[in-house]
Image (cartoon, rainbow, N blue to C red):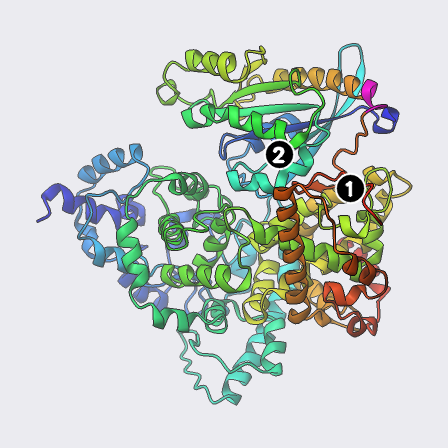
Amino acid sequence: MSSRKKTLLKVIILGDSGVGKTSLMQQFVNNKFSHQYKATIGADFLTKEITIDNNKQVTLQIWDTAGQERFQSLGVAFYRGADCCVLCFDVTNEKSLNNLTSWKDEFLVQSNVSNPQDFPFIVIGNKIDVDDSKKIPSLQKKLNNITNNQLGGLNYPVFETSAKDSINVESAFEVIAKMALQQEELNAANSNDVNDDYNDAINIHLDSESGGCGC
Amino acid sequence: MPTDQESSTISLNTSKVHLNPNSHNKLNGHQRNESSNSRSYSFLDYYGAESPPQISSGSTTIKKINGLDTESESIDPSTSLDVLDLKDDTLCADGDVINNSKSLDSEHRENYIQPINMASKSEILKSNFDRYGFKKGSTLHNITMEDYNEWFNIYSDSELRQLKKWHLLMKHHGFQIEENNNEEYIPTRFPPRSDKVKKMIRKGIPSSWRGNAWFFYAGGYDKLNKNTGVYEKIVANTRGIKNKDTEVIERDLNRTFPDNIYFNSNLSNNTDLKEEPNLIKSLRRVLIAFAHYQPQIGYCQSLNFLAGLLLIFMTEERTFWMLVILTEKIIPKVHSQNLEGVHTDQGVLILCIKEYIPSLWNILGKNFDGEPLEEDKILIRLPPITLVTSSWFMSLFVGILPIETVLRIWDILWYEGSKTIFRFSLTIFKLCLDSPDFQMNSQNGSSETEQIELFQFMQSFPKKLLDSNLLIDCCFKKIGGYGFGSLSQDEINRCRSFVSKQREKINQKNKNKSLTEMTDEEKTLIGNDIHDIYGFNRSIMSGMVWNKNIRKKLSSHKKK
C-alpha cells in the first residue's frame, strides 16, 4: 500500500489570515518572496522534493490554506491524510498567536488522524524581520504559555522565521519533513487495520459508515 | 465646531497626493479637464515610464473622473505630514475626528478609473501596465509582457470593430450618440434585453462602457433609486468602526490587487512618499459598508476582489449596490458565514460535470483507490477539485483568469446571471482536458496521481487563458465549440434546489445521527431517470457537435 505513495508527505499549513502562510510556502518551494501575494481563497498546494536524513528522498506536498475562519468548512477534505501540520502565527499579531490552539483543535477534529495525542505539529512564528517595536510584547513568555498549557505541553518544535528574508524557513521545513516522514511510516505500519481512505474526497461532515445500509 | 487640528485632518484626507510636489497639479480635477483636451496628460510623469499608458488628446486610456477637489491644495505639507504619522498607527484612517468632512469625502468617492476605448494602441503596447492599471507580465500569472502585447495587438483591433457595432446598435435603438473629438461617447442607458443585445454582450462590451452597462443590466438603477442616500449613510455610520470584519478587511486591502498601480503605490516610480491610493480607501469604505449592510455575510475574503474590480469601472456607491445584487440574487449564500452557497454550487458543478463531461467524471468520480463513487456519495464527499473551483465561484474568476478574460465573462454574467459561472467553469475544464499539456502528463497513473495532477493543472491552467475570444467561442458555439450555452438557468436552479435539499438532509442526519441515505424512491429514480432527479435537460445538449479541432486550436494558440 505505502509504496504506491512513493513517500509523498502531506503537510498542511494553518493559521490566521495574513500571517504569511503563502509566503512561507513560496519561500521554501520557489525561494522567492513577493509583496504581491493575494489573499488565498480555497486552497493551493505546491510540491518539492527534498533529501532528508541519510539520502532519503521524499516529496513534500505542501497545502496552503485560506485563513479566514469560514473557509474551514471548505477545507476539511485535504486535512485528511496529512503527515504533519504547521501552525503559523505572526509575531506582530497577538491574536494570531492566541488562535493557534483552535487551529490545532480544528485540524484534529477534521483530519481524523489515528494518533491525535502524538500527531506531529510544528509552530512557526513568522515575520521576525519586522521591527522589534511592533512585535508582541514578551513574546517568549506568551508563546511558552501557549505551547505548554494549551497545545498540550507536547514540546512541539517552534521556529521563528522570516519568509521575507528567508530566515529559518529551510530549517523549519527540514524538521517538518522529518516529522512527517515518521508519521508516514507510522501510518504505513498501521495501514492494514486502518482503512486509510484519506482525501479521496471532501468530507462534508458526514460519517460515511453507511456501507451496510440496505441497497 | 471643528478645531484647526480637525480641519487640517479633513483636508489631508482628500489631498494626500498633493504632498508630493511632482504630482501636485497632475492629479487635480480641473487641471485634468484642461489637459485632457489639449495635450498629453502628464500623470505619466508621476508614475514614470512604467505607468499605464496615458492620454494623448482624445485617446485617453485612463482618466480620473471628478478628480480631487481644489480646496485641499492649500495645505502646508509639514502639518499634514504630522497627521500622516499619527494615522499610520491607527489603521482606520478616517478616524472619529472627521465628522464634517462629508462633502469632501463624498466628492472624493466619485473617483474611479475609467478605461477608454479609443486608446492609442502604441501607448498601451509601450507600457508595462494594461488599460486597467494591472501589470501585464507577472510571474504569478505565467504571462510575459511579450505574450500580452502579441495578444493585445490583435485583440484591440477586434475591439474597435466591436465598438463600431455597438454604436450601430445604439443608433438602431434610437440612442443619440453625442460624440465630439475629445470626449468619448459613454452611454448610461442601454437597449432593452433581446437576442441581439445578448449576442453583442457575448462579443464584449466596450471597456469604457462596462461599468455603466453592468450596472444597467444587473438592475443597479432599481436598487439605487430605491435606496437613495443609503450608502452615504452607512459610510457615515461605519466610519472608524473596528470589529472582527474590519480587521480582516484591513489585512486584505493591500492584498487585493498588489499588481495594480491604482491599488499599490509601490508600483509607481516615485519612492518619496507612499500615499494610500484612493482606490484602497474606496475599497475599505465599500467593504466595511457592505459588511455592515449584510451582517449575515459580513466580510468574506474574495469580496475584496469583486469590489476591487468593480471600483475600476464605477463609483463606490454603485460598486456597493452591485455587491448587494450579486449576493442577493446571483450567487446567494456563496459568501455567507458557513459558505453554504459554495457547497451547494460545487455540488451542482460536480453533477454538471458528471452529466456533461463524462471524460472528466472518469477521473473525478472515483476515490483515490480508483473505486467509483456511489451515486449517493457524490454530494456527501465532493472531489478535491472543488477546492479549486470554489474560488472560481467566490471570486468570479478574478485572479483565476487573465483580467480581460474575467471582464468578458463579467459582461455576460451581469446580463445572463449565474448560469454563466457554471458554463465557463465547464468550458475551462473541457479546455483543460483538451489541452495537449494535460494529455501528456496524465498517462497511466493511479487515481490519486491523476486527481492530484488534475488539481495542480487546474491551479495554473486558467491563468494562461489570455485569449478571451477562444474561451467564449468554445463555451457557446455549438459547432466548433462545446455548446455549454445550452445549459439553462432553469436547469441550474433545479439542480441547486436538489443539491441544497440533499445537503439539508445530510445536516439533519448529522444532527440525528440516523444514517438514512437518499430515500428509496430517489434511489430507484437514480437507476433510470437520473436527469429528472438532478434537474438536467440532457436532451437539449445531446444534439451538440463536439469539435475535435479545439485541441488543435489550443496547441496553435500555445505556440503563438
| Amino acid at circle 2 | Asp
Neighbours of disc 2 within 10 Å: few (<14), some (14-19), many (20+): many
Which mark, by number, is residue A36? none
Q: Can you give x and y, in whole percent of width and height, for residue B240 in the image?
A: 28, 44
Q: Is residue B24 visible?
A: no
- Cα gap from disc 1 to disc 2, whole angstroms: 32 Å
Residue at 33 percent of width and 38 percent of height: B273
Q: Find out whether residue A190 is within the magenta segment.
A: yes
Q: Which residue is mark 2?
A: A64
Q: Is residue B84 above or below residue B439?
A: above
Q: Is residue B50 magenta?
A: no
**From the viewer's perspective, is residue A212 above or below residue A143?**
below
Start and end of the magenta stretch? A188-193
Residue A34 drawn at (x, y percent) = 54, 34
Query: Could you confirm whether marks 1 and 2 are on the same chain?
Result: yes
Closer-to-camera residue (A48/A193): A193
Q: Amino acid at mark 1?
A: Ser
